[in-house]
Image (tube, rainbow, N blue to C red):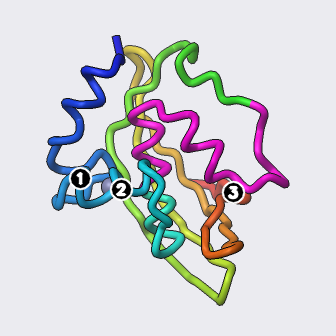
């Protein structure tokens, strides 16, 4: 259902899956093709888009090796999540470390929309940002 044709069609999608009105080709697309993220917020947005597009390879590649899972099995996830939107609340960078707080909205199967509120930590190594881990504040 999510084959190559789907990904090609998404190349022209506006707005970008992360919500940027500039569109995928000038937002998360280049990052998914290997360009380094300019900052942790851009990496976080591209990871959200990767969840939308089921780009497990990209999610693992941008996950810091110290906390990276062996696999995510996104393609086999049941019930299937539908990602509804992303709202970045805060981005604080201090040298090679950064924190991004965001709320993602999603729905599992035919269920109710729910919020995923996360404060993510990122680290930059050799010019590339990596996701380290996250905390989930109440509300
Ligand atoms: Zn984007």
Q: Is mark 1 within 8 Å of ligand 1?
A: no
Cα distance in 3D space between marks 2 and 3: 25 Å
Task: Give the residue displayed 58% in from the left and 36% down from the top.
Answer: 57
Q: Is residue 12 above or below residue 21?
A: above
Query: CB of mark 2 within 8 Å of CB of mark 1?
Result: yes
Q: Which residues are magenta?
A: 46-70
In this figure, which residue is indicated by the disc labeled 2? Answer: 30
Query: CB of mark 2 within 8 Å of CB of mark 3?
Result: no
Question: Where's residue 5, x and y in %?
Answer: 25, 20
Question: Where's residue 139, x and y in %?
Answer: 55, 54
Task: Give the residue displayed 15% in from the left and 48% down from the top.
Answer: 14
In this figure, which residue is indicated by the disc labeled 1? Answer: 25
> In the image as oriented, which residue stretches furthest toward the right?
66
Question: Where's residue 136, x and y in %?
Answer: 66, 54
Task: Give the residue displayed 24% in from the left and 31% down from the top.
Answer: 8
Tag 3 or tag 2, which sits nearer the N-term? 2
Task: Give the residue displayed 50% in from the left and 59% down from the top.
Answer: 44
Query: CB of mark 1 within 8 Å of CB of mark 3?
Result: no
Tag 1 or tag 2, which sits nearer the N-term? 1
- Where does ligand 1 appear, by image quarter? bottom left
Element assignment for label 3:
strand
In the rendered image, the quadrant that contains the N terminus is top left
Question: Where's residue 31, x and y in %?
Answer: 42, 56
> In the image as oriented, which residue stretches furthest toward the bottom?
95
Q: Is residue 125 left or right of residue 35?
A: right
- Residue 100 is inside the magenta segment: no
Label at residue 134: 3
């Amino acid at each position: 259902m999510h084959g190559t044709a789907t990904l090609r069609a998404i190349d022209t999608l506006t707005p970008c899956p992360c919500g940027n009105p500039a569109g995928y080709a000038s937002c998360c697309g280049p990052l998914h093709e290997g360009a380094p993220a300019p900052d942790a917020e851009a990496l976080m947005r591209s990871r959200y888009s990767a969840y939308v597009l089921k780009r497990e390879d990209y999610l693992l590649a941008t996950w810091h090796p110290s906390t990276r899972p062996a696999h995510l099995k996104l393609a086999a996830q049941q019930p299937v999540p539908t990602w509804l939107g992303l709202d970045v609340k805060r981005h604080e960078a201090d040298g090679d470390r950064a924190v991004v707080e965001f709320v993602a909205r999603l729905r599992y199967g035919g269920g109710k929309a729910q919020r995923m509120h996360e404060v993510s930590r990122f680290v930059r190594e050799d010019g590339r940002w990596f996701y380290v881990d996250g905390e989930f504040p109440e509300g």
